[in-house]
Amino acid sequence: MMKLWTVALALFLLSPGGWAQGSLRLKACGKGPCPPRRSTGLATLPAHQHLILQFRTHPGPVIRAELTGRGIRILGYVPDSGLMVSSSQTADLRGLDVTWAGPLAAADKISPALADSSASAYLVVFHADVAMDDARVLVGAYGFDIIDNPDLLPGQLVVTGSDIAGLAASDDVAYIMPASTDLVAGNPVLGCAGALTDAGPIADYVEVGTGWPQDPGGGVSLQYFFESVTPKLDESTVRSEIERAFSEWEKYANIRLSPGSQADAVRTITLLFASGDHGDGYPFTPGVLAHTFYPAPPDVDLFTVALHEAGHALGLGHTSQPGAVMYPYYHFATGLTDDDIAGIQALYGSAGVQPVTPPVTPPVTPPVTPPVTPPVTPPVTPPVPPVTPPVTPPATPPVTDTTPPSLSITSPGATIVSTSSASLPISGTASDNVGVTAVKWSTSNGDAGTVSGTSTWSAVVPLLVGNTVITVRAYDAAGNSGWRAITAVRH
């Protein structure tokens, strides 16, 4: 858990019909549901084996309570109607309306992104009940070396090696995807715990389901409500950055988001800032900055965090593409990638698609027969010459500058900096199509100031012990602004 702040975007799916039924959705099957899997007639769950149980309908609280009562541990939800489970002893499955039961195939556990990749370093995700000492022994047995990183999410290892197929065949392994450059380099990272449902977390091998139920004419209209905001950041900045993240998704998909009036309203995304155990059953643990309840990033750059978590709230799971916003580990983002855009458009279609309105058929009116009137001969009127109106030249609208300045932080060169000093020198450049009028800095500790210079600027920023977010903004004469942020960790 970050010392500065943590954020949870909690989403509640209150509209009827939100849970789909039928086929499983795994990333190995592509964007659609997997082909139906034939019933195996399995009556018992073998001990110490990870299996998917597919049900005829969504496994609600009654079914989940029955599983727990039979000694079966629920590890995650598999849309549209499955659960990943395990048991320390042989367990009875009879009478549970299970239509199919079976393990993940090795091919289900290998990210499709690896097919077109020359990667030799991988992020290996293990099932939640696997001890990490056992996981380390397992990857070593298949000839993999481990890249240690204390910031990894629970149940994950970064490894280098070649026998991916052999490792994927192991029952303890849940998924294997490309490792990002930060993970390969062993850099400090922050992870996202992923999308959550009432039936448990959605694992990385899952292609998240159908998202929010769509409006009758197409697309989806949602509201958002701020239940709380952190006192450690300016409230207007928090709201504007989160709203900017929502707008980024609206640019590319047929989604309409507007402010709501209450947290528990239908089709409403509720946002709150919290730390530790905050009442939703999923307390923040070390290294986890944010989480989202799926309809049902984590540097302290708020826009990047909100952009990633909003993707979960709109129905997306994690992607295996390291450069994408929806990758499970943070990297600074200024917008969506092609992978993110393809995912959200697969759920809701492209932006700008108008709702389909059924044609209106006017009522049939019987014809009215007018009375017969003798013709009237009009008087002869001499022609009137046409009047030519004066020509008025069109008014030229004033040119409005809407282009924000471009700003970069060149020193330090990283977005997260570790230091023991009470201050941090920073410098960079700024440019604008008309001209930069001012460059200012502010921190999450409440300090602020103006830098020296504009096109090439520098400043010395005071730090407190712990995490300090430094935001630098460049302004032009029209009031447009561009910004960049870094995080300093003072020991």
Image (cartoon, rainbow, N blue to C red):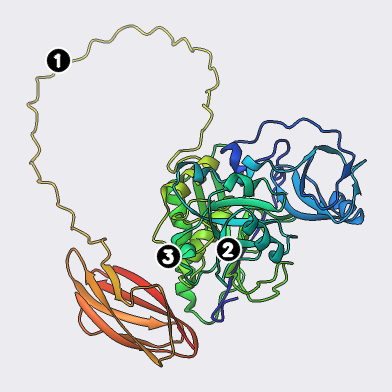
How far across and down, in percent of the image, does residue 342 sit?
A: 47, 43
Q: Is residue 422 left or right of 193 when viewed as pictured?
A: left
Q: Amino acid at mark 1?
A: Val
- Disc 3: CA contacts within 10 A as few (<14), some (14-19) or many (>=20): some
Contact between labelled residues 3 and 2, with CB atoms less than 8 Å apart: no
Quadrant of the rendered image containing residue 405: bottom left
Q: Is residue 419 left or right of 401 when viewed as pictured?
A: right
Q: Amino acid at mark 3?
A: Phe
| Of the pair 123 and 220, the residue shown nearer to us | 123
Q: How many marks on residues?
A: 3
Q: Amino acid at mark 2?
A: Cys
Q: Residue at x 69, y 44 (%)?
A: 79
- Label 3: which residue? 332
Q: In the rendered image, is residue 113 in sight?
A: yes
- Label 1: which residue? 380
How far across and down, in percent of the image, does residue 192 sit?
A: 58, 63
